[in-house]
Image (cartoon, rainbow, N blue to C red):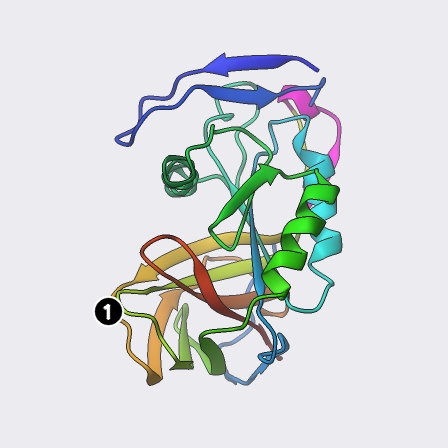
Amino acid sequence: MKKLRYLLLLPVPLFTLWFCTSSSSVKNKEDNNLKTKTYMPASKNVAVLELFTSQGCSSCPSADRLLEKYSTKDNVITLSFHVDYWNSLGWKDPYSSKEFTKRQYDYASALNAGVYTPQLVINGQSEMVGSDAGKIDNTLKKVWSQDQSSEVSIQSVKVQNGKAMINYTLKGNPANASLNIAVVEKRTVTAIKGGENRGVTLSGTNVVRNFQTLGNVKDGTNSYSIEMPEGLDKGNVSIVLYLQKGDNEITAASQAAILM
């Protein structure tokens, strides 16, 4: 397995980047008031898996496929963040964002880790190679053995004029915690025409399309609106909310599918 070293000029602490390179939409219908179904159980601690990946990395498809498998498990919420530092190497990932790259860098700084793809962070506390099923399973067991200290639940979502209005409830909110809100495309399919994955058709699971973090959130019923990216099929979209403490620990999470 080859490893390439790159340095990125970003307004965050720089790390040596090791990239594994083992030779690695539908027009929205008319807006309506839509109900949601929160399908993640609230009785056990929920594990949030954040995968930092890229369509330009030939080592990433195996991690993308593994993430899809974990997305079907109870008490697991998966998120696929596509980073942008592979974009100059033959293929521009249409789902990539500098914001997502910065989020990965922030995690690396907090966890005293390197920056690479595919990199998985579980509940903001543990990082590992995104295709390392053994390490992922062991980490999930630890997460599930812990008591749930907080709760977030999505009550409803109203989609209108290109925005999703989310009504949600928080309980046991830790002091100084933030609430992350993600609009995710549940499944994506892309024919890759350049770079290390040229000629391959890649699929993604819970690909983050818009992401915002709110500070100073309070217990009780709240609401917030977030932009819906153009061209998304509402039937292929979910909303994910998760509480995150100042030390990056995720204490509660919920995912809601929009019912047509």
Label 1 residue SS = loop
Question: In terms of image quadrants, where is residue 172?
Answer: bottom left
- Which residue is located at x 49 percent, y 26 percent? 87
Residue 2 seen in this snapshot: yes
Residue 241 seen in this snapshot: no
| Residue 197 among magenta residues | yes
- Relative to residue 97, is residue 177 drawn left or right? left
| Residue 105 among magenta residues | no
For label 1, the residue is 216
- Relative to residue 223, is residue 124 drawn left or right? right
In this picture, which residue range is highlighted in magenta?
A: 194-204
Give the vertical position of 65 relative to 60 (above or below). Answer: below
Q: Which quadrant of the rendered structure holds the C terminus? A: bottom right
Q: Tell me where residue 81 appears, x and y as whole percent.
A: 52, 45
Q: Nearer the viewer, residue 219 or 175?
A: 175
Q: Nearer the viewer, residue 149 or 66?
A: 149
The kind of residue on which mark 1 rests is: Asn
Decide: few, some or many residues near mark 1? Use Cα within 10 Å; few <14, some 14-19, many ≥20: few
- Which residue is located at x 57 percent, y 34 percent? 54
Q: Which quadrant of the rendered structure holds the N terminus? A: top right
Q: Tell me where residue 28 appears, x and y as whole percent.
A: 54, 67
- Relative to residue 171, is residue 204 drawn left or right? right
Question: In terms of image quadrants, where is residue 111?
Answer: top left
Q: Tell me where residue 170 appears, x and y as whole percent.
A: 39, 80
- Relative to residue 134, is residue 43 drawn left or right? left
Q: Nearer the viewer, residue 242 or 249?
A: 249
Give the vertical position of 54 relative to 32 (above or below). Answer: above
